[in-house]
Amino acid sequence: MNKLQEWPEPIVRVQSLSDSGTPLIPERYVKPPLERPSINSTASMDVNIPVIDLVGLYGDDHALRAAILDQIAIACREWGFFQVINHGVSPQLMDRAREAWRQFFHSPMEVKQAYANTPKTYEGYGSRLGVEKGAILDWSDYYFLHYLPSTLKDFLSNPLLICREVLDEYGKQLVKLCGRLMKVLSINLGLGEERLQNAFGGENIGACLRVNFYPKCPQPDLALGLSSHSDPGGITLLLPDNHVPGLQVRKDENWITVKPAPHAFIVNIGDQIQVLSNATYKSVEHRVIVNSSEERVSLAFFYNPKSDVPIEPLKELVAPDRPPLYPAMTFDEYRLFIRMRGPSGKSQVESLKSPR
Ligand SMILES: O=C(O)CCC(=O)C(=O)O
């Protein structure tokens, strides 16, 4: 039997637990002490991931463009995470997309249940990642859907048919922005502008969206909205909640709480860029904390390689003193790991490292 066909246990919607008013979270949402949010969390006012203004990236001012490329190169090397402002995506579109999805999560449970997902494709309304029986779960529900390739895009699985234009336009604009960032990363890695994109399969990349809904949590010190993980794909563009912080990025041994800039996207490097760049750029662990007074919504847009293209360190980034760190693997094979095991730090990409 294919292990990915069904969930191993009945699905409980975290939103229903939260709405029930229970003062205690069920045991299976209680994280082991070392994973709890209080451990090494920093919410200090003066630490944040870099904020980079993209205005000028495509203009005629060569010095300004070079300065932006430099800022992105430093952010990729030192953080693996940065925010972009003046990125070209309309702020109104960002707000409308987020609010449309917020409304979905506030629609009656029977409406949402009609889109309940299974681990077979993950598409639809979900409440857990991973299929391990008895796993400790995260305090969140989500909605997952495909944008690209268009053969995977299924309009009927989109519960926001009335907002189809907004969501289509949102997907188009984000694909365009990711394409621009891919060029920047490619140049910064010393490759031709198109090299990374071509390694992803050229025009035929994959793109999908996970909308995360983090309900209020009566015991936020014991739970996580999303456990520590690195993103398995290429580049992620996160549209965070406009009022409620929650994303934490790992920097050395500390967890830094991101302070989103208005109408910024949070960009992060995924495992596939780590593999292609032979670890010049590294994906970075992140997680989400929850709170007892406010819900939170975020839209994570994943820009991924074509699913059947072998991804391995690019020849230009391999040398006798820099041997390839990872074997070739398609993204379809790669993402099975997180789909089976759920979020688990950087264990997947680390486990791939060729023995030496
Ligand atoms: O909600 C967030 O801020 C982060 C979400 C995230 O990391 C993900 O969906 O992979």
Image (tube, rainbow, N blue to C red):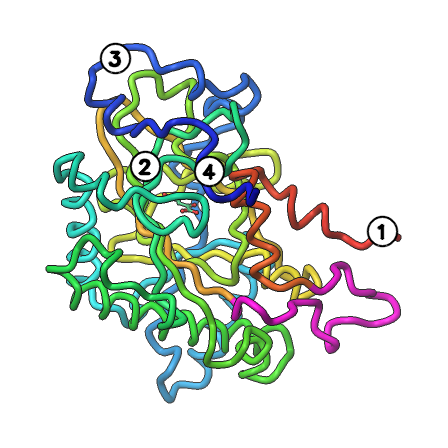
Which segment did they paint magenta?
A: 305-328
Question: Exactly how many numbered labels are in the figure?
Answer: 4
Q: Position of residue 140 (x, y in %)?
A: 34, 34
| Residue that mark 1 sits on | 355
Q: Mark 4 or mark 3, which is nearer the start of the sequence? A: 3
Tell me which secondary structure the magenta stretch mostly adopts: loop
> Which picture quadrant has residue 320?
bottom right
Distance CA(mark 4)–CA(mark 2): 15 Å
Q: Position of residue 187 (x, y in %)?
A: 57, 78
Report the residue at 57% width, 75% height from top. 196
Report the residue at 48% width, 62% height from top. 235
Q: Amino acid at mark 3?
A: Thr
| Residue that mark 4 sits on | 287
Distance CA(mark 2)–CA(mark 1): 38 Å
Q: Amino acid at mark 2?
A: Asp
Report the residue at 27% width, 10% height from top. 23
Q: Mark 1 or mark 3, which is nearer the start of the sequence? A: 3
| Residue that mark 3 sits on | 22
Tell me if the residue at label 4 has its CB under 8 Å from ligand 1: yes
On the rendered structure, is 221 left or right of 18? Answer: right
Q: Nearer the viewer, mark 4 or mark 2?
A: 2
